[in-house]
Image (tube, rainbow, N blue to C red):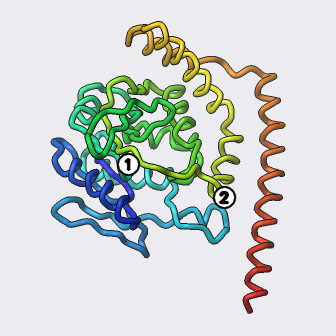
Amino acid sequence: MLGSNFYRGDASAMRRQQAAVDAVAALRGVEPINLQWTDEVDARKEREMETLAVLRHDSRTVTGLPLRRKPIMTEIFDALARAASERGCRYFAFYNADIVVTQAAIDTIADGGRQSYGFSRMDFDGETGRDLGLTPNGIDLFAFDAAWWRAERHRFRDYILGEWFYDPVFASLMLRYGDGLILNRRGEIRHEAHGHQPPSGPAAEYNGYLAALDSPYFSMWAGYRARLDELRARDAGEDDERSLQREAFARPITIGAAAYHAGRCARAFVRYRATTRERLNAVTRGAATAE
């Protein structure tokens, strides 16, 4: 069960999304799904992809602010897990809407037998098709055994899609609480490089708040990435990198670290509530002025 959330964008974004749709439509061994909201549907051609209009929550419902509408990652994963189970699929996977998924990624999932997978993308030049390099700082395709997701789902917070932080935290969780695998050497998924603005504003602040609550896992990811760079600087092999994955996400959380983290969570909660209150007041003042 291979799903994404397609959306209306400018001509360039729509072209990249169509390339992603075309790639998925050509894959073997997948059921492609376009996840949409119950009250707002951007449907794709039926011959290319089935549309499931099941999403009920978004960036507005979790923040309480009038933002651009974006999906919630846990709701996406819940919907795909449910659909996978109903149709007899062991795995479900989610990819960002402009990611070109290759058959190699699907075969790796189907043949590997792991509980979860995370793939980093290979950027390429849109005009020439030339590879520009891997981006191991992020994960653009997650795949989960549906039964594992249901068992461990309580560990995952309601991050907003399209903002920073969620993918390093989710990758850390899947390796700490299962036999997950990060694939960031061969570029099994591809992405046309394009300009973009770094996330900012209320949705980014919300994800940042959740990342503060998940800071032990974010720190595990940061430590893993630093050590991965060291391994690659000395041309270490794939076995060394697999060993690093097992080690980096298994370190114990001490009582002292847990106490410090509790204080950090309290501070993050107070700061985020204050910031959100200011934004809500600004919205209220703007509405009153408009009247």
Q: Which residue is mark 2?
A: 201
Decide if residue 275 is on the left or right side of residue 156.
Answer: right
Where residue 279 appears, as percent x and y from the top left, is: 76, 67
Q: Nearer the viewer, residue 207 or 55?
A: 207
Position of residue 197 relative to residue 113, above or below, is below
Q: Secondary structure at mark 2?
A: loop
Residue 273 visible, this angle: yes
Position of residue 151 relative to residue 58, above or below, is above
Q: Looking at numbered disc 1 in the image, what kind of residue is underneath it?
A: Ala
Mark 2 neighbour class, 10 Å CA radius: few under 14, some 14 to 19, many 20 or more: few
Q: Residue at x 67, y 67 (%)?
A: 64
Q: Could you tell me how many numbered marks the image carries?
A: 2
Decide if residue 33 is on the left or right side of residue 119.
Answer: left
Q: Looking at numbered disc 2 in the image, what kind of residue is underneath it?
A: Gly
State the quadrant of the C terminus: bottom right
Mark 1 neighbour class, 10 Å CA radius: few under 14, some 14 to 19, many 20 or more: many
Q: Secondary structure at mark 1?
A: helix
Where residue 26 appears, as percent x and y from the top left, is: 16, 47
Tags 1 and 2 touching, CB below 8 Å: no
Q: Nearer the viewer, residue 12 or 26?
A: 12
Q: Residue at x 32, y 37 (%)?
A: 189
Q: Residue at x 82, y 44 (%)?
A: 266
Where residue 223 appears, as percent x and y from the top left, is: 61, 21
> Image quarter for residue 146?
top left
Outermost residue to the front: 127
> Image quarter for residue 181?
top left
| Circle number at residue 81 | 1
Outermost residue to the bottom: 291
Residue 249 visible, this angle: no
Measure the C-alpha gap from mark 1 to mark 2: 31 Å
Decide if residue 201 is on the left or right side of residue 278.
Answer: left
Earlier-in-chain disc, 1 versus 2: 1
